[in-house]
Amino acid sequence: MAKNLLIVESPAKAKTIEGYLGKDFTVKSSYGHIRDLVKSEDAIDIPNNFAQRYEVPADKKQVVSELKKLAKEAEMVWLASDEDREGEAISWHLFETLGLKNDKTKRIVFHEITKPAIMRAIENPRTIDYNLVNAQQARRVLDRLVGFELSPVLWKKVKPSLSAGRVQSVAVRLIVEREREINKFTAEAAFRIVAIFGKGRDAFKAELPERFAEQAQAEKFLQDCIDAAFTVKSLETRPTKRSPAAPFTTSTLQQEASRKLGFSVSRTMSVAQKLYESGKITYMRTDSVNLSDTALQAAQQQITSAYGDKYYQHRKFKTKSASAQEAHEAIRPTYFNEHTIDGDNSEKRLYELIWKRSIASQMSEAQFEKTTAKIDISSRSEDLVANGEVMKFDGFLKVYLESHDDEDEDDNQDGDSAILPPLTKGQLLALQEMTATERYSRPPARYTEASLVKKLEELGIGRPSTYAPTISTVQNRGYVVKEEREGKTRNYRVLTLKDKAVKHEQKTENTGAEKNKLFPTDIGAVVNDFLVQHFNGIVDFHFTANVEKQFDEIAQGLTEWTAMLKDFYTPFHEGVESTIQTAEKARGERELGVHPESGKKMSVRIGRFGPFVQIGDSDNEEEKPQYASLRTGQMIETITLEEALELFKLPKKVGVFEEKDMTVAIGKFGPYIRHNSAFYSLPKGVDPMSVSEPQAIEIIEEKRKKDAEKLIKTFDENPDVKILNGRWGPYIEFGKLNVKIPKGKEPLELTYEECKALADAMEKDPKAKKPAGKKFAKKK
DNA sequence: CAGTGAGCGAGCTTCCGCTTGACTT
């Protein structure tokens, strides 16, 4: 039996450390927190100094009992959870739950998983830092109080099952407010002047720094240039440089993987988890940009041997975010000499990104020579400006270039990277072509998952381990949707001066198209407005930063944690009580105007089944209101009267087939035909307003043919039970339930009774009872 | 993926931060 039991948070870490320590040590993992507040309302005894009731959740029972057993047998237990607030609390929970003794327990910490770092830690043990533990308790209790008092207010005043919290509610607020900025935005057009001088390889572009608001001004400018002389007025050359970005943290990895690889935030995390578990990279949930000394040495060795000494530059990066707790290293390859790895495609690509970013961070600056030429126009007072850039030394750009969200495509092509031909002051230039193009100002960009994470991190809200789950939560609650939306076409004017004549053209461009962007829903907007109105202090962007400051004071022993909570809770709870008493139900109602034919009032609001338009007054018995649900992409705050009227034109009867009506309507997943209580989607490009009877019949028969191909077996006992071929092989469709066929069963030989038994078992097992697609997303 | 949009009342929902699998129709 090993004399020592060492406990860390992550099993992959445990494995590595066990290798360093030899047979005197058993190294085990707690798999994160082992205890949490009980789910019920009595988790916190508020009058009794916020005393907490903790329990070991079901999925942690086994871990705890194994650790308990090992702890009993060991001579010394080493608590080696992370050195931050949560890590300290994990050690304390372990101490309490495992029933450890002070003289048989040591607390150690390290920031990097290397043998010397671990040995140093073992030589310098300490005791549990109760100030830090108290800071964590304050954090935990505050989050529970906020979440479990605010959410029920929403159930009463908005809709059941909604949620609110210190982190998620701010995430929703950011998205709602950004959407409103975009709606409020009016694009302003101005003419941009670009001239092309010279021919062939010597051709280059120059731009007028000013823009013209009116077409007449642009026209005048081009006209003035017809017979003008263009001369190089001044030439200025200066050296510039660019430095590499810091190594990855969780948030920057999520951002770059989103931009460069198109990964969602959760995909990045699950691929990174695999890389971490197979020992390829260091820990992936970190807010530190720091590299260990051993890593720095390895990077230096790789850079000098692969690229030479002049590419190496030692750098130490400082974290920018004030909320960072830096219990780990930055995300980096475990072994820098592995430039690529085995694994699936996404693992390879993410690893490559991490390798390049880490290596580049220790490389020298890229050096450029930037030339600015001012070009005089004989007939005008303004000058044209041409910029050129020549790279003198590539430095870190040899391996890695960070990308940015706000890259402006149309400005970029004649941007800094262009090369100018040799020019001399006073040189006369031959104009090839000059254009005045109407360009529109852009609204603020909608958030992507990754840019939302970036913003949250800047505000100090959330932690590396919660960015991805937070983004899922706000989508699961229906506050936010990640969607693709079509843009609109827009005309713009182009004036071209060529061969001494000005030509006018009208061109079109697509604008506002979005892919994988976060949009608020109506319920998201209503909940946000309710919280902003009644709990502004909690959804304030600075709330977290303020309480973090107080948690820090607790951690330093300057503030008593229950006093801090009391100061927070008393006014907060009063706000909750008074809101329950006085606030009206929030339904997000908005009046649209008057129905053009009947003169009845038209309004939109949120109902039990989502947002809808109403014609007529519900209070007026005689009016008998009509209702229609809003469609995807439509919101209460922005829908127009015209769009609302369109909603009443569908569903529309298009004909009869097999003695039953066929009706066309638009649902969540697009336009469809309903026939005999079955649904048939319309193929893309078919206009739902003009579907003919034969066309509808054809669509129905096509779908039936496809379904028949998937069918393997039916039962006489029950026509609602079928065995079908799905994407992952055969499965049973038991009424509305989709049932997996256990391994070893031949689908064709299954009897009806066996199917029923499998379906019953699935219905009973709460874990297996997952909704089959969207069909069961709503519970009764 | 429809239709619905009243009200009563029981019983349910909900937070953030640490972890890793199980699972996917």
Image: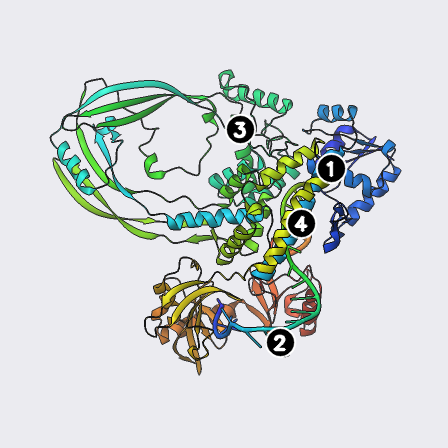
Q: Which residue is mark 4?
A: A145
Residue A515 image point, x, y percent: 43, 49
Mark 1 or 4, which is nearer the eye?
4
Residue A702 image point, x, y percent: 44, 70
Q: CA distance from mark 2 to mark 1?
A: 61 Å
**Upstream in the sequence, badge 2 or badge 1?**
1
* Residue at figure coordinates x 17%, y 35% from the top left: A221
Q: Which residue is mark 1?
A: A133
- The residue most toward the bottom is A659
On the image, which quarter does residue A336 sit in? top right
What chain letter is assigned to the residue under label 4?
A: A
What chain letter is assigned to the residue under label 1?
A: A
Q: Which residue is mark 3?
A: A246
- Tag on residue A715? 2
Q: Residues within 10 Å of mark 3 (few under 14, many from 20)?
A: many
Q: CA distance from mark 3 to mark 2?
A: 63 Å
